[in-house]
Image: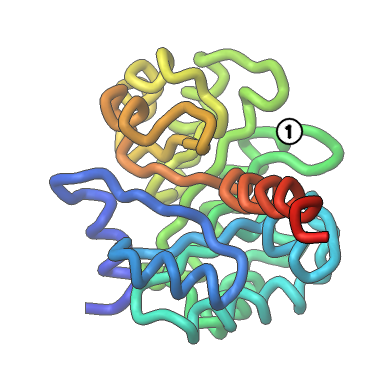
Amino acid sequence: MSRAETLRALHHGDTPLVLPNAWDPVSARIVAEAGFSAVATSSGAVARVIGYDDGQLTPEAEMFAAVARMVRAVDVPVTADMEAGYGLSPQEFVERLLETGAAGCNLEDSTSDGLTEPERQADYLAEVRAAAGADLVVNARIDTFLHGGTVADAITRGRAYRRAGADCVYPILAPVESIAELKEGIGGPLNAHAAPDGPTCAELVAAGATRISYGTSLHHYLMDSFRKLLPELG
């Protein structure tokens, strides 16, 4: 079974897929050694570690190289957070991501210009699916709740993205109480966002989430701990 097939199957197992997001080979290795069945990258954390900020400000060559280093560091599937695709055509995006060895990707439906029109994003996702075939597990992030949208808006986008071939949809920062409605309305695997300060993985699983990821929250938490520790070291 290929790594993409393994990752896809993990979205349909008896237990939710939990993905503490990593940002370099060391953190990826720690996640794998802790027994997690796959590793997800965090674009925001990766960007900051290599000297940039979040929001597609990292040169795509550096992001692909960072993903490749994490893939080489572990024996489990790696799904890469690739923001909104860095302006690459679907064909080039897929070719370059597959070269890294990644088994999946997360693609956002907003940029600094705001939310992408759902039809346009669905077309992009459909072209990514066509180029990748079964070789990538596509997680379609829905940024509705980052822009003051409604559950109905998120469902509309999620349905369009699923029809376009997305394996999973990710209405990031969706209120816990909306998870069940989103899952029922969209259908298929649903990714929810957890964080050390909540909502917790257990809460999201109880609400019906299929896949749990932590985004940049773990990196933020550790950097805050580092910042607090430093005055004690001088």
Q: Residue at x 45, y 75 (%)?
A: 29
Residue that appears at 53% across and 68% down: 27
Of the pair 216 and 105, the residue shown nearer to us:
216
Residue 73 in the figure: left or right of residue 209: right
Give the left or right position of residue 64, taking residue 158 as reference: right
Q: Please tell me which residue is depicted at 45% across the width and 53% down the height of the picture.
A: 20
Residue 151: where, in percent of width, then height?
A: 51, 15
Q: Is residue 81 above or below residue 119?
A: below
Is 33 or 144 nearer to us in this picture? Answer: 33
Using the rendered image of the protein, determine whether residue 129 is visible from the camera's viewpoint.
no
- Label 1 neighbourhood size at 10 Å, few (<14), some (14-19), many (20+)? some
Locate residue 167, reporting x and y percent. Answer: 38, 50
Which of 2/205 is in front? 205
Above or below — where is 223 with respect to 207? below
On the rendered structure, is 109 left or right of 142?
right
Residue 59 placed where, x, y %? 83, 70
The residue closer to the viewer here, 77 or 118, is 77
Q: Residue at x 70, y 66 (%)?
A: 89
Task: Read off the residue under disc 1.
Answer: 115
Q: What count of labels does the image hold?
A: 1
Q: Which kind of residue does numbered mark 1 sit on? A: Leu
Check the image and report above or below for 203 versus 85.
Answer: above
- The picture places residue 76, in percent across and down from the top left corner, at 34, 74
Observer able to see residue 105: yes
Quadrant into which the C terminus falls: bottom right
Quadrant where the N terminus lies? bottom left
**Which of the colour schemes (rainbow, by chain, secondary structure, one colour) is used?**
rainbow
